[in-house]
Amino acid sequence: MAEKMVAYCGIFCSDCGAYIATKKNDDKLRQEQADKWSKQYNHPIKTEDINCDGCTSNSKLINYCSVCEIRKCGMEKGVINCAWCSAYPCAKLDVIFKHAPATRQTLDAIKKVMH
């Protein structure tokens, strides 16, 4: 099994439709993800916007990830993800933890094995 890529916030980038479509260079998957997110977020997303190498990369990112404050903070601090930060958990993570509680479980599990 391939190693999972964890975003700064604890989301598994490697499970994201945009990441998968990019890695497979599959335009059908890109279209499916664009349609899904367009409906889910009630905002038009174009197929060509579905190109992402994951949160921790410095190359292709979906629009939101390129402006994400959590990602920006993690990059500035030079941590692998937020679990590696001495200030973890911080208020920047409250919103993601509220909407995606599994992200906290992921980061807590990483923090636990670090000690």
Image (tube, rainbow, N blue to C red):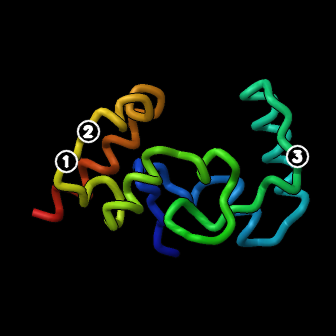
Residue 62 in the figure: left or right of residue 76: right
The amino acid at mark 2 is Cys
Q: Residues within 10 Å of mark 2 (few under 14, many from 20)?
A: few
Q: How many marks?
A: 3
Residue denoted by label 2: 90
Residue denoted by label 3: 46
Q: Earlier in the sequence, mark 3 or mark 1?
A: 3
Residue at the location (69% across, 49% down)? 63
Q: Are marks 1 and 2 in contact (CB under 8 Å)?
A: yes
Residue 14 in the figure: left or right of residue 43: left
Residue at the location (38% across, 33% down)? 97
Q: Earlier in the sequence, mark 2 or mark 3?
A: 3
Assign a secondary structure to mark 1.
loop
Of the pair 42 and 27, the residue shown nearer to us: 42
Residue at the location (50% across, 55% down)? 12
Q: Residue furthest left?
A: 115
Label 3 to label 1, Cα distance in Å?
A: 37 Å
As drawn, 96 above or below 113: above
Residue denoted by label 1: 87
Q: Residues within 10 Å of mark 3 (few under 14, many from 20)?
A: some
The amino acid at mark 3 is Lys
